[in-house]
Amino acid sequence: MQKHPLPQVPADNARAAFCAAAARLDEAEARSEPFAMSQAHTQLARCHAALAALPCAETSLQHALRWGRFTGSTDLVVDLLGELSETAATIAELAEQAGVGRGHAARERARDHAFEATTLASRVADGAWEVQVLLRASEVLARCGDSDDAAQLQTRALRLIADDLNLHSDAARLPPTGRLADG
């Protein structure tokens, strides 16, 4: 799992990227198109993350999610929920390392976003991506200390893989689980 949940903007370009993302958001607001608004807020979140402002990144992702829900795209919503869960989990970890009391609330947000993503996972456009969503949520839950829920999601993902490969009737033909079985 990556330590930083959002794609990095190069540090030397972070301020310029932030200004460009803010301009893109202004343009999207003028048009009030849900997809453009969601994408602009997501890009702004990435810039906040590059500037080590994870709470601001989380807020931008929450705005992106609200607009993403208006698009009607389950895939977009699920992806944003994954970003939010990873960001909140990182905030929780950093708060714990710093001895700040916000870790518990951030961990709860991470869990909520991960569970919502898994609820919607069966409605994404691609079965292989459904597996990725489940494994992503599983990793977030493991980071939050929910090893039982994480293991259940891994099992659900393995069942989908087995069904996709038509291996569910012969467990010996299943691919090795490697780290998935660790818990």
Image (spheres, rainbow, N blue to C red):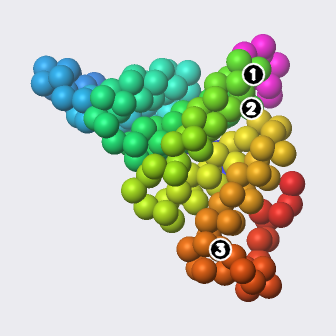
Q: Tell me which label, 3 or 1, sits earlier in the chain.
A: 1
Task: Say whether residue 75 is magenta.
Answer: no
Q: Verify CB contact (< 8 Å) between mark 3 and mark 2.
A: no
Task: Say whether residue 98 is magenta.
Answer: yes
The amino acid type found where label 3 is placed reads Ala
- Mark 2: give few (<14), some (14-19) or many (20+) Cα within 10 Å: many
- Residue 103 is tagged as 1
The amino acid type found where label 2 is placed reads Glu
Give the extent of the magenta segment.
94-102
Q: Verify CB contact (< 8 Å) between mark 3 and mark 1.
A: no
Distance (Cα) linking label 1 and label 2: 7 Å
* Residue at mark 2: 93
Query: Can residue 2 be seen?
Result: no
* Residue at mark 3: 162
Q: Residue at x 57, y 41 (%)?
A: 119
Query: Can residue 138 be seen?
Result: yes
Q: Tell me which label, 1 or 2, sits earlier in the chain.
A: 2
Distance (Cα) linking label 3 and label 1: 37 Å
Q: Verify CB contact (< 8 Å) between mark 1 and mark 2.
A: yes
